[in-house]
Structure formats: C-alpha cells, structure tokens
Image (cartoon, grey):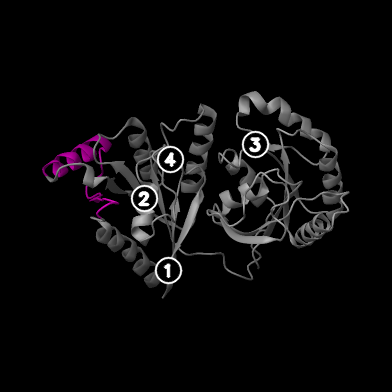
C-alpha cells in the first residue's frame, strides 16, 4: 500500500507554505508576504503518530483570474487535488471569509475527496474563535483553528487528516522500524540531544525560549530506527489550553505507538526534578517502559558536583533499581557514546527478534 497523499490548497497568502515548512521540519517552501510566491507543487515526507504520508504544497488558487501565471498555479493545484487522498483547505482568519474561499470550496466539493477545513493565523484561540465560526458558512465541515507560524493546533489538524487514511489491507507491512521517544520539559535540551547524536548543527530546532518543539518530529537514523522528539511538558509560556493539548499529544503517542522500544527522559542536571518530571517518569513506568534518564547540560556544572546531582535526580524521581542515568553535554558531546550504546543495543534486539 503506497503512502497517502495530502495536498494543501487555498487562496494565495493564507499561510500554506508556512504550514508546509512546519510539518516538513525545514524550510523547503519559500515564505513571503507577497501572494503567489509558490507556483509549482512542492513535496515532503511527513510522519504523524506512526503514520507516514506525502505532503504537497501548492500555489494559491485564484478561481477567476485570467493572469497566465495564476492560471498555471491553479492548474498545478488542480493536479494536486486530483492526486491527493486528503485535502487541507486553508483559509485566513485575519482576512475573513471572502468570495474566493467559497469558490475554492465549490471546487473541492467536486473532487469528492475528504476535505479538512483549516483556519490559519489564529494566534489567540480564546479571542479569535468567534471569527473562526464564520467559516462554517462554507458548508465544508468543521473549521479547525491553527497558527502555522506559532505551530498551534497542528496536532488536532493532523489527527483529523490521518482519520481519513485507509487501514492497512495486509498487502504490505506497516513501518515497523523501532522508535526511541525523547521527552522532557521545554528547554531541557531535547533538540540539542538529537543534533548532538546525529552530528548535525540544526537538524532539530533549538531555542533559548521554552516550548520550541510543539509537534511530534521524527528523525530517521541510518534507515532502521527513529528518534521521536515530543513536545516539552511543563512551564512553556503558552496558554493552559495549549499545554493540555501537548500533554494529550504526548500521552497518546506513548500509549499508542506499537513500535516504541525505549523512552529517554531528559532532566537538567543542574536542578532537582520537578513535580512534572516525577509525573512523567511515573506515567512512562506505568505504560510498561523503563525510561533511560539523560542528565543534560553536564558542561554547566563542575565535575565535583556531578555525582551529587545524579543522586538528587535518582532520589527526586524515586528511580527503580537499575535505572540507567547518563550525564550528557551537547557542547562537549560527553555521554554521546554511552547513549549510542543503548540505541545500538535496541537495534541488535530488533535484529534478533526478526531472525
């Protein structure tokens, strides 16, 4: 069974390329304020909750324009619509519902494909929801509010997308490559750990501002294993509503992934574990995993403090006997080899099971 295809369509400048880049994990599509920048179809492979699909970014659709370039963009978008299994129809809450949106909706209805109505640029869910409700008038389904630029609401949107994917028919096995989940508070160093393990400076995005990772990101390692970067839990500077959604996203993945083989729980070695850290540790254990503790930011403390801080982590989390604690520094790469030993042991276990 081939991967499902998801096309992003909508008027120019509603944020299609911004959403595409957010889901693809890198800047593949060009983003500008000028309408009509994306003229051709652009493709990327995307993962969500163990589902893989091909994402297509299209040029903006101007239904009535006779401009040659805009007409060609409309033709490219129509090809993407014809190819797609699911269509993400993007609109702009700040511009409001316009006549062109209704005409694009009519075009999509004729495709007889599943359509997910997405209302972009909703930077404040509480204040802007009345404006979102206006898009019910399109008669094409419930609008899903998102902010592609701030990566808000993407989990709910992706859940709606994969709900339309066909179940495996048994003709081809699902991707059974093992996964290692990486969890921890915002700014604890999850993205830095991934970059350090893979010797890449900016494969995973890092920031001094907590809460940079707001979706589930998958990183394929040598074609036979995935590192899964989960959103940070705890004190990120976002609303309680968004925190709750991230929490559900993390729990849903840890509980539902059939390929998950290990969980790396990251704790800042400089500080005692927080109540959120303890809750996450207990929950992971409850799910049947023995989390491996990665004590990050090792370079930030003196060598004489290391054992004292490791002891504080063990006591603060009330670790099960034998739980592995690996001090790690993204700056000096200390601890990297030991983490790779753990990952390679998982690979060997998978190989033995497959024999």
Kindly identify which residue carries mark 1.
Answer: 222
In-front residue for pair 300/137: 300
Q: From where the camera sits, is residue 288 visible?
A: no
Q: Would you name the residue on which mark 4 appears?
A: 232
Q: Earlier in the sequence, mark 4 or mark 3?
A: 3
Residue drawn 25% across and 42% down?
A: 319
Badge 3 marks a residue whose secondary structure is: loop
Q: For the residues marked 4 and 1, what is the alpha-carbon distance in whole angstroms?
A: 25 Å
Say few, some or many: other residues with alpha carbon within 10 Å of mark 2 (under 14 / 14 to 19 / 20 or more): many
Q: Residue at x 46, y 58 (%)?
A: 219
Give the x, y percent position of residue 45: 59, 61
Q: Residue at x 26, y 61 (%)?
A: 337
Nearest the viewer among 346 and 241 is 241
Q: Earlier in the sequence, mark 1 or mark 2?
A: 2
First in sequence, mark 3 or 2: give its number: 3
Q: Residue furthest bottom?
A: 355
């Amino acid at each position: 069974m081939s991967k499902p295809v998801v096309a992003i369509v909508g008027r120019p400048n509603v944020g299609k390329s911004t959403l595409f880049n957010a889901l693809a994990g890198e800047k593949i599509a060009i983003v500008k304020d000028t309408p009509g920048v994306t003229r051709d179809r652009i493709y990327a492979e995307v993962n969500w909750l163990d589902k893989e699909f091909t994402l297509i970014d299209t040029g903006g659709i101007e239904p009535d324009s006779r401009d040659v370039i805009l007409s060609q963009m409309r033709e490219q978008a129509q090809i993407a619509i014809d190819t797609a299994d699911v269509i993400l129809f993007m609109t702009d809450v700040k511009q409001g519902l316009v006549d062109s949106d209704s005409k694009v909706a009519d075009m999509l209805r004729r495709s007889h494909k599943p359509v997910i109505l997405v209302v972009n640029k909703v930077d404040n869910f509480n204040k802007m929801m009345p404006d979102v409700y206006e898009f019910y008038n399109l008669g094409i389904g419930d609008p899903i509010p998102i902010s592609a630029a701030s990566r808000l609401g993407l989990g709910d949107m992706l859940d709606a997308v994969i709900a339309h994917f066909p179940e495996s028919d048994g003709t081809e096995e699902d991707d059974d490559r093992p996964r290692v989940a990486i969890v921890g508070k915002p700014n604890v160093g999850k993205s830095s750990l991934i970059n350090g393990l893979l010797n890449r400076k900016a494969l995973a995005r890092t920031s001094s501002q907590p809460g940079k990772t707001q979706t589930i990101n998958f990183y394929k390692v040598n074609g036979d294993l995935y590192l899964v970067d989960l959103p940070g839990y705890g004190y990120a500077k976002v609303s309680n509503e968004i925190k709750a959604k991230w929490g559900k996203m993390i729990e849903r993945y840890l509980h539902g992934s059939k390929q998950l083989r290990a969980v790396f729980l990251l704790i800042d070695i400089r500080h005692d574990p927080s109540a959120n850290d303890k809750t996450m540790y207990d929950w992971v254990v409850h799910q049947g995993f023995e989390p491996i503790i990665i004590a990050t930011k090792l370079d930030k403390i003196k060598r004489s403090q290391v054992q004292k801080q490791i002891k504080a982590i063990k006591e603060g989390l009330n670790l099960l006997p034998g739980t592995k604690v690996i001090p790690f520094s993204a700056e000096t790469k200390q601890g990297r080899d030991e983490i790779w030993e753990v990952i390679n042991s998982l690979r060997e276990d998978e190989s033995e099971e497959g024999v």
